[in-house]
Image (cartoon, rainbow, N blue to C red):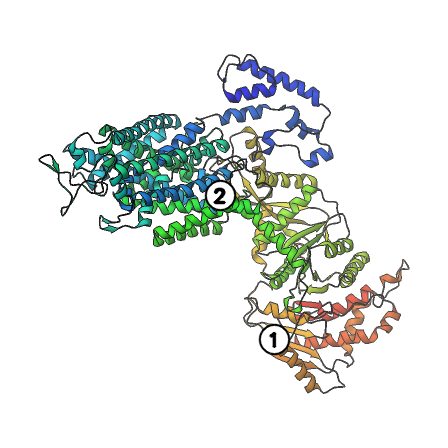
Amino acid sequence: MSKRHSLIMRITGMESKFQGPNGADDTNVHNNINRKKSTMMLNVNGLWDVLPRLDHYRMSRRAKRPSLSDLHDGNPAAVKDVNIETGILGVSSIGALNSESNGIKLGWIQGVLIPCLLNIWGVMLFLRLSWVVSQAGIFQTLIIIGISALVCVITTLSLSAISTNGEVKGGGIYFIISRSLGPEFGASVGIVFAFANAVAASMNTIGFCDSLNELLREHGKKIIDNGVTDVRIVGVIAIFVMILICAIGMEWESKAQNFLIAIIVIAIFDFLIGALIGPHNIDQKAAGFTGFSMEVFQNNWHSDYRSFENTSYNFFSVFAIFFPSVTGIQAGANISGDLKDPASSIPSGTLLALVISMISYVTFVLFAGGAALRDASGSVINSTIVECNGIECQYGLHNSFSMMQLMSLWGPFIYAGCFAATLSTALTNLLSVPRLIQALGRDRIYPGLIYFSKGYGKSGEPYRGYVLTFIVASVFLLIANLNMVAPLISNFYLASYALINFCTFHAALIRPVGWRPTFKYYNTWLSLVGFILCVTFMFLIDWMTSIITFVVIFALYLIVVYRKPDVNWGSSTQAQTYKTALSTVYKLNCIDDHVKNYTPQILALAGAPEVRPDILYLANLITKNNSLLILGDVSPKHLSYRTRSAKLRNGYAWLQSHRIKSFYHIVGDSNFEKGASALMQATGVGKLAPNVVLIGYKSQWTTCNYQELQEYFNILHHALDQKLAVVILRIPHGLNRAATNTANYNSVNDEEHLMQSSCDLAENNTLMHADSDLSMSSQQIPRVQSVPAIGTQQVGGIDISHLSTQIPLRESIIHSSSARDQLKNKKKNAADRMLQHDKQSEKTFEVEYISVFQKKHRHGIIDVWWLYDDGGLTILLPYIISTRSNWEHCKIRIFALANHKQDIDAQEKEMAEIMAKVRIKYTSLKMVDDISMEPKQETREFFDKLIMDLQKNNTNGNSDCIIMDSELQTLREKTNRQLRIRELLLENSSRSTLVIMSLPMPRKGAVSALLYMAWLESLTRDMPATLLIRGNQTSVLTCYS
C-alpha cells in the first residue's frame, strides 16, 4: 500500500480494505469517498465557510476557495463547488495526488546522500589528491580542504535554509535562487550553473579516460596513441552511454548509482588497508611507497610547488584544481523535483555527505603524505633502490598520478573505484543539466531554451535537453586536459555558491513575513561571510576568469531585465523594495521642507486614463522621473471590489503601455466635488502627497447642468483651502478623447455581465495563483485583449455614462487539456470574436491621435504670462517643461505686468534680475504697461455675447444660476482686466505652441461660478494649448545655493 493512498485513507477515515492504486479494492475506496461526500453534504449543509485544505495554500489551480465576495454576498454555488462536492479531500485532490505520484520519487539517501557522495568523490580523489599533497604539502593541503569545507558547509547551511522555506520544485539551484532573489539572478546563475555541470561532466570523463590510458599503458596496450586522441574518442563514447542511462529514467539511474557507490567505498577501504599494511616488495618502495614513516611525514609536511606541464603552481592555483572535488553539495538540490520531501532530504543528506567526504579526504591526505615519497626513481639495482638524485624521476607523489593504485591492497580495484567515481560524478552532472534547462524553458525566461523544455513520458524526461547537454559536454571534452578544465569549473561553482549564500543573507536580513525556513541552523552574517569568501577565492584563483564569469552573469541578468518576464515569485528583492520604500517614506516624513528641494507633486483629476490622455501627458511631462504623479478618478456609482480591481488593472495597463509613471486612485459612490475633495485630503503618504491639483478646463460650462458647474468651481476652492496649487489645462479641440470618438465604440448595456467576464479573465491570470511547479504547458502565450468597460462615470465634472471606452486588459492564456480549461478557452475565443471590432477601432484611434505634449517641437514658442506673484510656480513649470527632450528647443518668452506709476525700464531690469537669480533662462522679456487700458469695443461685445444667455431671468427663481447685474457692476474692473489681457494674449501669443499664465484668484463669496468661468473663457478661447496656474503663495524658487 502506497504512502499517498494511506494518507487519503487516513484523512477520509477509511482504514480497511485498501490494497493500493491497482488493487481490487480501489472501487470500494472511491465508493467510501462518495459516501463520505454525502455525509459532508449533510454536515456542512447551510454553512458558508469552507474547511482548511492544503491545496488552498498551493500556488495551483487545482483547488480554489470561495472569494470574499462569494461569502459576503451569499453565493452558495461557489462554496458548494469547493466544500460539498469535493469534500475535505475531494476527487480533484485525489487526482492531483495520483498525478503527482507519476514517476520515481527518491528519499534522502537515494536522492541526496548518494548523489552528493558520488559528485564529491570524483576524479580528484583518485587522480589528483596525491599530486595536491606533493605540491602543497600535508599542512597546506589540510588548509585547502578546510577552506573548501568551510565554504561548502556555509553554502550547505544557506541552501538548507532556502530549500526548507516552502516547497522546492524541479530546477534545483535555479529554482531556489530565482524564487529567492527573482528571475533576473536565478536565470543568469541557472545558465552558468548548467554550463558548469556540463563542463564538470567533461572533466570527470577526462579523468576516466586518463585512468583508462594509464591502465592500458601498464599492460603495454593502447587504442590509438595512448594520449589525447584516445581521451577524445573514449570520452565522447562514454558521455553518449551515460546520456542514454540518464534518458532511460530515474529508476535505472538510481540502480547504477547504487552499484557505483559500492565500488567507490570498496576502493577507498582498499587504499586505506593497503597503506596501513605497507609495501609488499622492493619495487613498490622504489616507486615511492615506503609505508608509514615519521621522516616521510615530516618531509611532506611543507609545500613544494613546482612547474607541471609548463604551468607554475602556487597555493591558489592548486586550490582551484582541488575545489571541484567538493562541489557535489548541490547534487540533491539539482534533482529536487524528483525527491519525495525536498525540504528535509536536502539538508540532512547534503550535510551528512559533506561530513563523510571531508573525513575521507583528510584521511587520504594523511595516509598519502605519511607513507609515500614526493620523488622516486622506480629503479632497483642489485636489490638496492636507486636514489632520485640528478635524474628525471617518473615516480612519487609529484610525478605519478597512480600512487593510490600503488599503495592499495589490490591495485585493480583502485582503477575500478576511479572509473566508478569519475563516471558516477559525470552521470550525476549529466542528469541535472537537462532538468535545469527544462525548468528555465518552462519558465519562459530565455526563449531559446523553450524548445529544450519539452518533456516526454510519465516523468517528463527532457530528451531534447539531453541532446544539448551531450553537445556541450563533448565540446569541452575535446580539451582533454584535466588541469585546464578544473579552474574554469571552480569559478563557475564559486559564483553559484556565492549567489546561494547571498540569497539566504538577503532573505534573512530583509526577513519578509514569508521567510519561515524550518531549518534553523543558519546565520544571516555567516551567509554573508560565505558570499564574501566565494567571491574572494574566485579572484584569487584567476581574476581574468572571474571577471569573465561576472560579465556573463551580468549579461544574462540584463537580458532578463530587458525582457521583463511576467512572473511574480515573491522574491526577497520584492520584499527589499517594499522595505526600502517604507523606510524612505518614514525618513522623508522627518525631513523639513525646503524650497531648494521643492518638486511639483501632481494630483491629476482626469478620470480614467484613456478618456483625457492630454492631462496625463502634461502631468508626466512635469513629473517624469522626478516627482509624484497621482491619477484621480471619481465615479458616482458604487464600485464592487471586482469592478474596482478591473478598472485599476486596466488603468495601470494603459499607463504602463504609454510609459507614464503614475499611481491610480479611484473614489466611488460619490459626486465629483466630494470625490475630488477626498482625493486631495487623503491621497498620498506622509511627504509623498500632492501639492498641485491638475484639472481639465470645463469647456461645456455654458450648457452643462448648473450643479455640475458649481461642483467644478467648488473643487478649485477646496484645492486652495488645502493650500494646494491649481493648474487648469485647456487645449483647442477639447480634452475628452472618448467624447470626440464616440462613433468608434459600441454600446453595451449589461455592465455587470461584462465586468464579471473581464474580472474572470483577469482573475485566472492572477500571478499569486499561477502554477510555479515548472510544469506549465509550453504553449503559454501572453497577449493583450481589449475589453469594453461601461458604466455611469463622472470625471472632470462631465457625465460620460453614455460612452463605452476600450480598456486594454493583460492576460495570460494557459492552454490545458482538461475539460474545464477547454470550456474556458472556448468562452475566451467567443469573447475575442465579439470584441474584435472594438479592438480594431481602438487601435486605429490610438495611431491617429498624438497629443501636443508628445510631439517634438523644434521651433516652438512657450509664452509665460507671469501676471501675479504666486510663489514662482507659474515660472517654474514652464522651465521644467523646457528641460524635456521634445520641448528643449523651444523659446521661452516672458510677459510681466508693469506698474504705470514706476519706471518701466527699472521694472524690466528688476524682473531680469529675478530671472537671473533664480537661474531660469529665457529668450525675451516684455513688460506690459498698458494693462489698465479699457478693452476694445469688439472685446466688450464678445464678452456680452458670451454671458447673454446667463443673464436671463431664472424660471426657478434661483439667483445662483444667473450672473446678476450687481455682480457685474461690482467686479467690472476685474472683468475689464481679464478682457484686456485677452487682447494682449491674442496680439502676442495666438500662434505660440504653449501659453502658460497666472490663474485669476477665485475669491470666496466675491465671484460666482458663472462669472469666473466667463473670465477663464475670455482668457483661453481662440488660443493654443493654455495652462492657467495659481501657486499656493509659498516660494518654490530661491536665489540662494
Taking the spot 77% from the left edge, 52% from the top edge, the residue there is 671
- The span from disc 1 to disc 2 (Cα, nearest Å) is 49 Å
- Amino acid type of the residue that numbered disc 2 sits on in the rendered structure: Ser
Badge 1 crowding class, 10 Å Cα cut-off, few under 14, some 14 to 19, many 20 or more, is: few
* Residue density around tag 2, few if under 14, some if 14–19, many if 20 or more, within 10 Å: many
> For residue 369, what is the image quadrant?
top left
In the image, farthest residue toward the right: 957
Mark number for residue 927?
Answer: none
Where residue 825 appears, x then y in whole percent? Answer: 55, 35
Residue type, label 1: Arg
Q: Give the number of the disc on residue 919.
A: 1
Q: Nearer the viewer, residue 293 or 377?
A: 293
556 on left or right of 735:
left
For this view, does 237 lie left or right of residue 438? left
Secondary structure at numbered mark 1 = loop
* Above or below: residue 702 compared with residue 651: below
Q: Is residue 794 left or right of residue 849?
A: right
Secondary structure at numbered mark 2: helix
Residue 489 can be seen, yes or no: yes
User: In the image, 597: left or right of 27?
Assistant: right
* Precedes in sequence: disc 1 or disc 2: 2
x, y percentage for residue 131? 26, 42
Pointer 2 residue = 178
Q: Nearer the viewer, mark 1 or mark 2?
A: 2
- From the top left corner, tell me how far across and down residue 97 is, in percent: 53, 25
Determine the image quadrant of residue 876. bottom right
- In the depicted structure, whether residue 22 falls above or below residue 685: above
Q: Which residue is painted at 24% across and 33% down in the image?
A: 407
Q: Nearest the camera: 594 or 739?
A: 594
